[in-house]
Image (cartoon, rainbow, N blue to C red):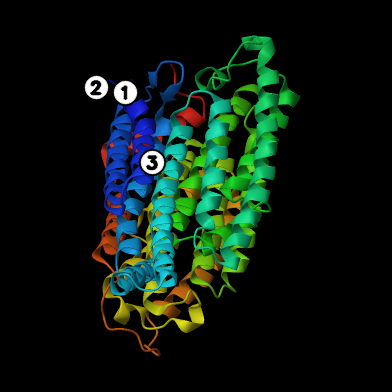
C-alpha cells in the first residue's frame, strides 16, 4: 500500500463508519466507530513516520501531507480512537451518562412487552421512547464519525479552499453534537457557537480569497491555492499578504478559541456530551491552529517573521490573561477545563510568536500533549458527572474515594495541564520558555510564566477540592461507571508520561522537522 493510499484511507475510513452508523444497529455503530478510530490512528502513524525527516507524501493533486500535517494528524487520530472507546461506556452502560437514554429505552421495552395487546396509547408511548433512544444513539455516532473525518480531511487536503470547506463542515456537525442532549443550555450553546464560529469562518474565507488574489501575479489566475506551492512562493504583495494573515488569525482563531473570539467555547464545551467536549478541546482547536500556521508560512516568506510573530504573540497573551483570570472563579468542572483550553491555545500562540526553532518544537510537542491531557481531563469530568450527577464543583467531593481509577487519572491529567514534571507539557512549556529567552523576549517570558502560574492556581485548587477533599456526599460505592471509560484515560496518561520522560526518536524527528518547516528551513 502506497503512502498516498494512506492519505485517502484517512478520509475514506470515517466516511464508511458514518454510513454504517447511520444505516445499522447500535452494536454495529460502536464497532464501526472504534474500528474507524483505530484504523485512522494506524494510518496517521504511518504517514507521520514517512514524513518525519521532512519529506512529503501525496495522492494526486487533492491530498498531501508533510511533517506539520503529521503532528496534527497524530493528535486528531488518537482522540478519534480514544473517544470512540470512551463512548461505548459513556452511552452503552446502564450507569453511563447515556443512562437516561438507556433507561428510557428499557422502560419502553418493558411497557411494550407487558402491554401486549393492551392500550394503543401505551404501545405508542413505548414505540416513541424506543425511537428516541435509538435516534440519539444514531445521531451521536454518525456525528462523531463525520466530525472526526472532517477534521482529518482538513489536515490532508492540499487545497486551502477545500481545507476551509472541511473546517466549515466541522462547525455544522459539532454544533449539532453540542445540542444533542436537547437541554435549554445545550441549545443555547449550540446557537451561540454557530453564530460566532460562522462569523469567524466568514472572515477566514475572506482571508483565503485575499491570499488567492495575492498569489495571482506569481502563480497565475488558474492556481488552485495548493498548499505545497503557497508555502514556498515568494514575491507576493506585502500589504495583501498581511491582510490575509490577520483575517486568518481572527477567523480561524475564532474556532481555535483565541480571545476575544473565544466566548462560544466555555458554553459549548460545558454543554456538549463529554466525548464531544474532548474532541472540541483536544482536536478541533488544534486543527484550526494548523490552518493559521499555513498562513503564517506564506506570510513569513513574503513579509518576514516580525509581523506574524507579533500578531500571534498579542492574541496569545490576551487569551492566556483572560483564561487565567476566569480559571480562578469557575464553579463548573467542564467550564473549568474549557477555560484551560483557552489558556493552552494562548500558550501555543505565544510560543509561535517567539518564532525560534526550539520554541516552535515546543509548540508542536504542546499541541500533541495538550490533546492527550485535555481529552483525558474531559473523560474524567464525564465519569465524575455520571457518578455525582452534577458538574458543580461545590457539590463534588471525595472523588478519589468514589472513583479510584478515574479520580487518579483525572488528577494526573490536571497535573499534566499544569505543566508539572514528569508530564509532556512540562517539557513543551520549558522548550517554549527556552525559545523565548534565546529570542531575547525576556518580558514575554515573564508575562507567560506569571499568567501560567495564575492559571495553575485556579485549575489545581478546584481539582483538589473535587478529588482530594473528604467525602461529604453519599455516592454509590467505589465503582467506575465503565471500564471502557477508564481505558482511554489510562492511554492518555501513559502517553503524557512517555512524551515527558523519553519521547520516541521518530516522534522527536517529526517535531523538529515541523519546527524547521515553520522557519522555512526545509528544502523540497
- SS at mark 1? helix
Can you identify the residue that label 3 sits on? 18
Q: Name the residue located 37 percent from the left edge and 59 percent from the top edge.
A: 376
Query: Visible in this render: residue 79?
Result: yes
Q: Residues within 10 Å of mark 2 (few under 14, many from 20)?
A: few
Q: Image quarter for residue 114?
A: bottom left
Q: Name the residue located 27 percent from the left edge and 43 percent from the top edge.
A: 35
Can you identify the residue that label 2 sits on? 1
Residue 5, numbered circle? 1
Q: Quick one: 252 or 469, which is closer to the camera?
A: 252
Residue 454 vs 15, above or below: the answer is: below
Instruction: Indicate which disc, 1 or 3, sits on the residue closer to the N terminus.
Output: 1
Is 462 situated left or right of 471 in this image?
A: right
The quarter in which the C terminus is drawn is: top left
Q: CA distance from mark 2 to mark 3?
A: 24 Å
Q: Image quarter for residue 266?
A: bottom right
> Outermost residue toward the right?
239
Please say if the residues under marks 2 and 1 sit with CB atoms less than 8 Å apart.
yes
Q: CA distance from mark 1 to mark 3?
A: 20 Å
Query: Visible in this render: residue 430?
Result: no
- SS at mark 3? helix
- SS at mark 2? loop
Amino acid at each position: 500500500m502506497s503512502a498516498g493510499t494512506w492519505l485517502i484511507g484517512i478520509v475514506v475510513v470515517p466516511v464508511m463508519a458514518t454510513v454504517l452508523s447511520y444505516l445499522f444497529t447500535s452494536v454495529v455503530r460502536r464497532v464501526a466507530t472504534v474500528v474507524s478510530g483505530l484504523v485512522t490512528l494506524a494510518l496517521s502513524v504511518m504517514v507521520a513516520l514517512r514524513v518525519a525527516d521532512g519529506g512529503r507524501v501525496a495522492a494526486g493533486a487533492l491530498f498531501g501531507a508533510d511533517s506539520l500535517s503529521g503532528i496534527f494528524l497524530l493528535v486528531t487520530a488518537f482522540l478519534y480512537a480514544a473517544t470512540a472507546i470512551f463512548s461505548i461506556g459513556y452511552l452503552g452502560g446502564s450507569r453511563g451518562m447515556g443512562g437516561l437514554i438507556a433507561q428510557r429505552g428499557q422502560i419502553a421495552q418493558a411497557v411494550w412487552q407487558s402491554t401486549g395487546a393492551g392500550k394503543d396509547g401505551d404501545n405508542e408511548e413505548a414505540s416513541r421512547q424506543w425511537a428516541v433512544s435509538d435516534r440519539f444513539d444514531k445521531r451521536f455516532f454518525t456525528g462523531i464519525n463525520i466530525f472526526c473525518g472532517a477534521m482529518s480531511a482538513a489536515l490532508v487536503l492540499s487545497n486551502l479552499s477545500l481545507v476551509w470547506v472541511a473546517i466549515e463542515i466541522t462547525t455544522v456537525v459539532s454544533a449539532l453534537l453540542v445540542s444533542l442532549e436537547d437541554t435549554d443550555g445545550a441549545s443555547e450553546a449550540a446557537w451561540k457557537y454557530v453564530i460566532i464560529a460562522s462569523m469567524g469562518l466568514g472572515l477566514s474565507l475572506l482571508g483565503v480569497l485575499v491570499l488567492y488574489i495575492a498569489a495571482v501575479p506569481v502563480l497565475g489566475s488558474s492556481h488552485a491555492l495548493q498548499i505545497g506551492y503557497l508555502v514556498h512562493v515568494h514575491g507576493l504583495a506585502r500589504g495583501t499578504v498581511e491582510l490575509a494573515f490577520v483575517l486568518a488569525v481572527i477567523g480561524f482563531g475564532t474556532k481555535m478559541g483565541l480571545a476575544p473570539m473565544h466566548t462560544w467555547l466555555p458554553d459549548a464545551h460545558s454543554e456538549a456530551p463529554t466525548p464531544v467536549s474532548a474532541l472540541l478541546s483536544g482536536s478541533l482547536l488544534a486543527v484550526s491552529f494548523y490552518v493559521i500556521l499555513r498562513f503564517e508560512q506564506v506570510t513569513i516568506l513574503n513579509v518576514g517573521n516580525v509581523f506574524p510573530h507579533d500578531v500571534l504573540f498579542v492574541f496569545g497573551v490576551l487569551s492566556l490573561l483572560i483564561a487565567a483570570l476566569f480559571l480562578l472563579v469557575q464553579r463548573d468542572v467542564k467550564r473549568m477545563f474549557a477555560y484551560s483550553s483557552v489558556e493552552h491555545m494562548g500558550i501555543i500562540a505565544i510560543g509561535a510568536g517567539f518564532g525560534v526553532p526550539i520554541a516552535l518544537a515546543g509548540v508542536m510537542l504542546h499541541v500533541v500533549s495538550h490533546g492527550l491531557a485535555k481529552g483525558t481531563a474531559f473523560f474524567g469530568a464525564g465519569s465524575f458527572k455520571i457518578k455525582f450527577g452534577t458538574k458543580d464543583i461545590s457539590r463534588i467531593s471525595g472523588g478519589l474515594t468514589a472513583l479510584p481509577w478515574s479520580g487518579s487519572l483525572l488528577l494526573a491529567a490536571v497535573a499534566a495541564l499544569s505543566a508539572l514534571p514528569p508530564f509532556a507539557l512540562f517539557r513543551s512549556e520549558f522548550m517554549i520558555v527556552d525559545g523565548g529567552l534565546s529570542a531575547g523576549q525576556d518580558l514575554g517570558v515573564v508575562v507567560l510564566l506569571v499568567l501560567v502560574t495564575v492559571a495553575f492556581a485556579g485549575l489545581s485548587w478546584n481539582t483538589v477540592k473535587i478529588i482530594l477533599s473528604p467525602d461529604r456526599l453519599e455516592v454509590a460505592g467505589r465503582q467506575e461507571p465503565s471500564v471502557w471509560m477508564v481505558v482511554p484515560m489510562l492511554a492518555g496518561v501513559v502517553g503524557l508520561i512517555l512524551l515527558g520522560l523519553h519521547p520516541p526518536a521518530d516522534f522527536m524527528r517529526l517535531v523538529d522537522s515541523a519546527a524547521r518547516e515553520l522557519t522555512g528551513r526545509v528544502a523540497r
